[in-house]
Image: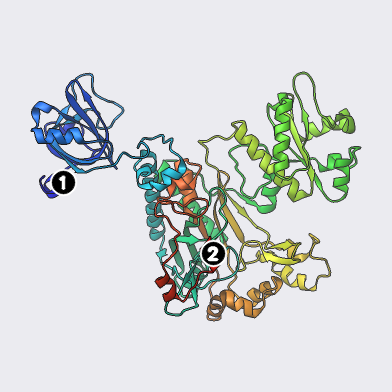
């Protein structure tokens, strides 16, 4: 066989067209398919750029090469040299960009063989996920994944270019950092040089990007890998990628403006979709109230309606007692749901239970007349008023949940999404981008009777609520009371939501040590613990910390949205399973005794035995 340097491609498999007819070319690629028709061989040759048909006429090539062509099977890597010719009348394939031509092969070589692949390399893959992950390189050869990875690259490139033009520096923060026992669990790396000590892999570059602000790099970004050792939920990965950014001398409006322009640019470049800016902003209270979730999907309506006042004094105890004890009664309307069957109601009630509801009340308005199991308690009149209040017209269904406010809202929010999906209410071609702002600064943990940071200990309180911090220390109210000043304090913390996905999260940060100290005190973090957690940041803040704010966008989720896949796995070249295992390289693995020795580590006997 000639040297590969003599067989190297002159063109890729996606580029030859009718204008190239008559050219002598060489192609390299994988055998996508082969067939023998009327004594002629046809092979579709594939590479990243496309497919080109090569034709081999046994009469026209020497017998050794013919034997090679005979040997070629799916996924063999081959080289073919020949003349581009127009496909004969009637064999043009308008579906292929190269469909007008074929290569009339003069020389043919197998460059490398392939075992029979465990699944076929085709657009629709029916193989089991496990198998696809084990042979990820084969899965990645499939066109949809090639397209996803291309689009991911194009997205990161677009982001880099955009931010660079806006004066941002891309700065790498370390991958081996100090472990902080808060938040999600750290992945740790043992130190050999300092035995018994460990680095942590970063859960995010948060503290380092803030220190970059102290260092004067007032616009920073990084396409950063973040690692969290969490029990993985359905579509989580132990490592994910963020477009992380931070700016100095800014307020949240500035972060919104940059990110709105960035999103509009990315959507235009990647999808040729025009996104309107600015994006609507809703406070946390408002989204919970109206859609029962902090990441509302606004591609469809079905807002929650508040029926509390209507039922306050009604005869139906389930409602009125709940209202009396401070709860709410809320509902959602499914347009055209009036003809729901018994079975559909049962299924939906089961769903509601799985979301935490103790029951689901409803009023159906079919053509034959209204139906409701609570009619005997609430009477015709109140039923009509509830329907009027909720805009439940003839033919519709009204579903009602009675509970504590946040709980009732969360249940209805889940039901709304469920019904939206089940009943095809979600317009897949619509893009709804929005900000959720003013998250509560603290969460009160009733079990541990302590305040916790809702997002981040460095989240800056809303400027109007700074006084509440001080008031809380003096307040005689019990912390379980929602009126407690600390429970009313809002944070300058925001999320970017696209089509019901939380795509980004960020905030204004505290830059004054005195304010930070107060927050730490509320959280019950003493100075020793604070020092262990992020003393190096607090120390840096003693040397002139500018006001700063930032955000991190989940790149995997963003790309998943842009490609239209429901799973981030489809846009990550080498994802892990839900058990954080990589089936392709088999990680994690034990390490050998010598390595352990060198690191000063020992594995417990009971674990070894397992
Ligand atoms: N560091 C935060 C996160 O990883 C994002 C931010 O506030 O910038 O979620």
Above or below: residue 88 compared with residue 318: above
State whether residue 87 appears in this view.
yes
Name the one closer to the observer, 552 or 272. 552
- Nearer the N terminus, badge 1 or badge 2? 1
Q: Quadrant of residue 606?
A: bottom right
Question: Circle 2 — which element?
Answer: helix
Above or below: residue 544 compared with residue 490: below
Name the one closer to the observer, 177 or 287. 177
Which of the four quarters of the rendered structure image does ligand 1 lie in?
bottom right
Question: Circle 1 — which element?
Answer: loop
Left or right of residue 278, residue 442 in this image: right
Q: Quadrant of residue 545?
A: bottom right
Above or below: residue 343 compared with residue 368: below
**Residue 499, how many percent across, how many down?**
55, 43
Question: Can you identify the residue that label 2 sits on?
Answer: 607
Q: Quadrant of residue 488?
A: bottom right
**Residue 11, how many percent across, how many down?**
19, 41
Question: Can you identify the residue that label 1 sits on?
Answer: 8
Q: Residue at x 66, y 53 (%)?
A: 284
């Amino acid at each position: 066989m000639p040297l590969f340097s003599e067989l190297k491609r002159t063109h890729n498999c996606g580029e030859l067209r009718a204008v190239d007819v008559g050219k002598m070319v060489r192609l390299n690629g994988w055998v996508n398919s082969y067939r023998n028709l009327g004594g002629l061989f046809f092979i579709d040759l594939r590479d990243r750029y496309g497919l080109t048909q090569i034709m081999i006429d046994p009469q026209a090539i020497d017998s050794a090469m013919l034997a090679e062509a005979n040997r070629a099977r799916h996924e063999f890597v081959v080289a073919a040299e020949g003349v581009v010719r127009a496909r004969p009348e009637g064999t043009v394939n308008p579906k292929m960009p190269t469909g007008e031509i074929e290569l009339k092969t003069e020389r043919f070589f197998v460059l490398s063989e392939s075992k029979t692949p465990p699944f076929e390399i085709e657009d629709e893959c029916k193989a089991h996920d496990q198998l696809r992950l084990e042979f990820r390189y084969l899965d990645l050869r499939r066109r949809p994944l090639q397209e996803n990875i291309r689009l991911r690259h194009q997205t990161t490139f677009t982001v880099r270019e955009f931010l660079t033009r806006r004066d941002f520096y891309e700065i790498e923060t370390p991958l081996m950092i100090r472990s902080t026992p808060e938040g999600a669990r750290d992945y740790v790396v043992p130190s050999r040089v300092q035995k018994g000590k460990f680095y942590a892999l970063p859960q995010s570059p948060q503290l380092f990007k803030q220190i970059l602000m102290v260092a004067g790099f007032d616009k920073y970004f990084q396409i950063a890998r973040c690692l969290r050792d969490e029990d993985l939920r359905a579509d989580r990965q132990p490592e994910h990628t963020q477009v992380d950014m931070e700016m100095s001398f800014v307020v949240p409006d500035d972060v919104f403006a940059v990110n709105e322009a960035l999103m509009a640019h990315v959507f235009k470049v990647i999808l040729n979709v025009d996104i309107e800016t600015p994006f609507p902003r809703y406070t946390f209270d408002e989204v919970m109230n109206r859609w029962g979730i902090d990441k509302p999907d606004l591609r469809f309506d079905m807002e929650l309606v508040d029926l509390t006042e209507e039922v306050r004094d009604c005869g139906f105890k389930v409602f009125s007692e709940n209202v009396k004890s401070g709860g709410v009664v809320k509902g959602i309307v499914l347009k055209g749901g009036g003809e729901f069957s018994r079975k559909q109601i049962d299924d939906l009630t089961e769903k509601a239970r799985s979301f935490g509801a103790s029951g689901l009340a409803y009023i159906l308005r079919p053509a034959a007349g209204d139906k409701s199991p609570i009619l005997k308690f609430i009477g015709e009149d109140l039923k009509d008023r509830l329907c009027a209040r909720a805009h439940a017209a003839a033919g519709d269904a009204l579903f009602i949940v009675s509970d504590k406010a946040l709980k009732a809202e969360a249940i209805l929010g889940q039901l709304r999404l469920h019904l939206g999906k089940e009943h095809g209410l979600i317009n897949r071609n619509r893009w709804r981008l929005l900000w959720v702002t003013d998250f509560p600064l603290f969460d009160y943990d009733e079990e541990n009777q302590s305040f916790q940071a809702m997002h981040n200990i460095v989240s800056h309180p809303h400027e109007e609520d700074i006084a509440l911090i001080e008031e809380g220390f003096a307040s005689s109210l019990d912390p379980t009371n929602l009126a407690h000043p600390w429970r009313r304090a809002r944070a300058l913390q925001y999320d970017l939501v696209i089509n019901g996905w939380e795509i980004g999260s960020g905030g204004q940060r505290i830059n004054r040590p005195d304010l930070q100290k107060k927050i730490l005190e509320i959280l019950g973090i003493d100075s020793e613990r604070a020092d262990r957690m992020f003393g190096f940041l607090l120390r840096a803040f003693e040397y002139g910390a500018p006001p700063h704010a930032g955000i991190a966008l989940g790149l995997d989720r963003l790309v998943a949205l842009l490609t239209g896949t429901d799973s981030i796995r489809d846009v990550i070249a080498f994802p892990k399973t839900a058990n954080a295992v990589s089936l392709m390289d088999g990680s994690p693995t034990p390490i050998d005794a010598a390595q352990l020795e060198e690191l000063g580590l020992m594995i417990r006997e009971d674990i070894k035995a397992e």
